[in-house]
Image (cartoon, rainbow, N blue to C red):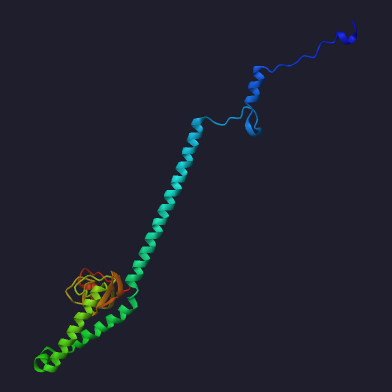
Amino acid sequence: MSEEQNKPADATVEPTEATAETANTAAPNGAPNGADAGSPEDRVAKLEAEVASLKDQLLRAMAETENTRRRAQRDREDASKFAVSSFAKELVSVADNLRRALDAVPAEGREQDEMLKGLAVGVEATERQLFAAFDRAGIKKLDPAGEPFDPNFHQVMFEIENTGKAAGTVVQVLQPGYTIHGRLLREAMVGVAKGGDAGGQHVDTKA
């Protein structure tokens, strides 16, 4: 036989089941075979974690928005309450002068002089109307006679010995104080009992 006849015929390779399975399991988009896409449980856990994170961010954003809204509302309320503070300070001086005018009229003078009596009655009516307006505006008068000294609302002008009062007790009010919606508008100017009368205590007038 010739040399060509002795050559075996070219074998035709039939695709086997294993070859087809290998081709089918190749990862998409050129990913290497056998790439692990994660189990369904892992994917669910990942999605749940993302949802929890987004929910936390949403709650934080809502809380910050609410805090901002409350701060803005409080600022508006404060502006409304205290915008008249400067004007109110001027008015309390008017109240002081009305009281001085009334104190200057002696009781016997009212009885003897009808004109003086009528003037005093008119000033008293004006004073009442002014304090009614103060009440509507949240302005309160401080008359701390007999109360303990409070450095937040009182200004000590002097100390008085031998008053029979506990140290630091307000024994004289030179000028009443005022607050507006609980905030100090003007300090009360006072005299207090000196510490030697009650156990040797001393009032810090510079507080």
Residue at 65 percent of width and 24 percent of height = 23
**Does residue 61 appear to the left or right of 150 in the view shown?**
right
Residue 179, x across and y down, in percent: 28, 73
Judge by depth and name the residue closer to the eye, 136 or 23. 23
Quadrant of the rendering where the N terminus is positioned: top right
Residue 47 higher or lower than 166, as above or below:
above
**Does residue 43 appear to the left or right of 150 in the view shown?**
right
Residue 110 higher or lower than 188, as above or below:
below
Judge by depth and name the residue closer to the eye, 50 or 190. 50
Residue 144, x across and y down, in percent: 22, 74
Residue 119, x across and y down, in percent: 16, 90
The quadrant in which residue 78 appears is: bottom left
Residue at 47 percent of width and 45 percent of height = 54
Quadrant of the rendering where the C terminus is positioned: bottom left
Can residue 207 be seen by looking at this rendering?
Answer: no
Residue at 30 percent of width and 78 percent of height = 88
The quadrant in which residue 116 appears is: bottom left
The quadrant in which residue 69 appears is: bottom left
Q: Residue furthest right?
A: 2
Can residue 185 be seen by looking at this rendering?
Answer: yes
